Image: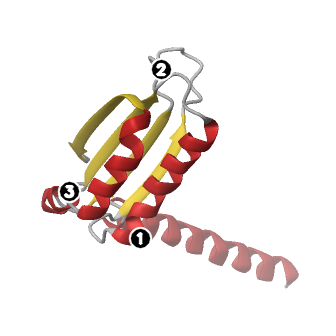
Amino acid sequence: MMKRFVASGLAIVLIGAMVAAAWSASESPSKYSHAGQLRHVVLFKFKDGTSAEDIAKVAKAFAALPAKIPQIAGFEWGTDCSVENRSQGFTHCFVLTFKTQKDRDEYLPHPEHKAFGKIVGPHLDKVLVIDYVVQE
């Protein structure tokens, strides 16, 4: 009797796992698709001698933009940690996500974005910007 109970329980667990795996596989690609979103990638190379305090002010000001500009759907940033030594002096990377190209186009002339440009401008040696639409 006990063996039959354990076997039945195991069968139920296995069937449940198979159903969950099949559901997950069928739902994941479309549910989590980012296709069509626009990524706005910004790389900063700061001028020699820019203080750590000024760099921190720039990063803080950039990170404040999503709360001020509703078109920004996502934001992340970090500093270079590559071991390939190919950064060409670019140390900071910021990635903004927009749902549409129209949202990006509204962000660019936004007064808060322009104000940020005045904060960062005096400290930049170079800036590199690449926009792309997510493909899947």
The residue pinned by badge 2 equals 89
Q: Can residue 28 be seen in this view?
A: no
Instruction: Identify the amino acid type marked 3.
Output: Arg
The residue pinned by badge 3 equals 104
Horizontal and vertical percent for residue 82? 56, 24
Q: Would residue 61 appear left or right of 131 to someone viewing this image?
A: right
Horizontal and vertical percent for residue 7? 74, 74
Q: How crowded is mark 3: few (under 14 residues within 10 Å), some or many (20 or more)?
A: many
The correct choice, above or below, for 123 with respect to 60 in the image is above
Instruction: Identify the amino acid type marked 1.
Output: Ala
Q: Indicate which disc, 2 or 3, sits on the residue closer to the N terminus.
A: 2
The correct choice, above or below, for 65 with respect to 41 in the image is below
Horizontal and vertical percent for residue 117? 32, 48
Instruction: Identify the amino acid type marked 2.
Output: Gly
State which quadrant residue 68 falls in: bottom left
Q: Would residue 71 appear left or right of 32 to someone viewing this image?
A: left
| Marks 1 and 2, how far apart at CA | 29 Å
| Marks 2 and 3, how far apart at CA | 27 Å
Query: Mark 3: which secondary structure?
Result: helix
- Whether the residues at callouts 1 and 3 have beta carbons within 8 Å, the answer is no
Query: Mark 1: which secondary structure?
Result: helix
The residue pinned by badge 1 equals 67
The correct choice, above or below, for 110 with respect to 62 in the image is below
Identify which residue is drawn at 57% across, 75% down.
16
Horizontal and vertical percent for residue 45? 44, 28
